[in-house]
Image: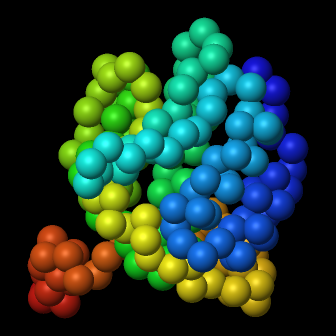
Amino acid sequence: ARPVPVGSFAYCCRPLLRASSLREALTTGFGFYRLVLSDFSPHLRVSGDVAHVHLAVHAPANGSLHYAMRSFTFLSFGLMSWLVGRRIALRHVQFPDGPSSSGVDVARMFHAPLNYGERCAGYSFDARWLDLPVVRDAQALREFLRQAPANLLVSYRDPARLNERIRALLKQHLD
């Protein structure tokens, strides 16, 4: 319903560097965004050995709300991977609307199964990732913010994944 103030992402990231674990970083960051966002709120829930990030909706669903939730889902996933210096392996990603008509390959961005038509947007991953330490510092954050959001798209493509290795080999032998 209203734009997020410019600089909110950077302001949120600074205290995350002091978190001792990914769990603490997510709890802190989501707490900040629950103050800033009015249409939906991010939450972390752990059930057994699975961590769930879900966005509780507080406004009527429309195209701009779906876009905002997709963006938040992607940015929060990219940020948490950056904070721990490893791509977090997701179990699945879910959205309340259907596939994007923008042509963006959402499954490739997340490297996880996608579920559409769900009650809320969010993603799940193994809860053991929550115990990873935050490994980034203030200098790394300055560089990260200078390149955001592009670095979220590129930096956390996992080149070790089989499909990425196959693509690289095929590109080398196109002739």
104 or 142, nearer to the observer: 142
Find residue 163 and report its image quarter: bottom left
* Residue 102 visible, this orientation: no
Q: Quadrant of the N terminus?
A: top right
Q: Is residue 60 above or below residue 120?
A: above
Q: Is residue 144 left or right of residue 87?
A: right
Q: Is residue 67 above or below residue 127?
A: above
Residue depicted at 26% across the width and 33% down the height: 115
Residue depicted at 34% across the width and 35% down the height: 94
Total numbered labels placed on residues in the image: 0
Rendering coords of residue 63 (x, y %): 56, 20
Rendering coords of residue 17 (x, y %): 69, 76
157 or 13, nearer to the observer: 13
Rendering coords of residue 92 (x, y %): 27, 46
136 or 152, nearer to the observer: 136
Rendering coords of residue 145 (x, y %): 73, 72
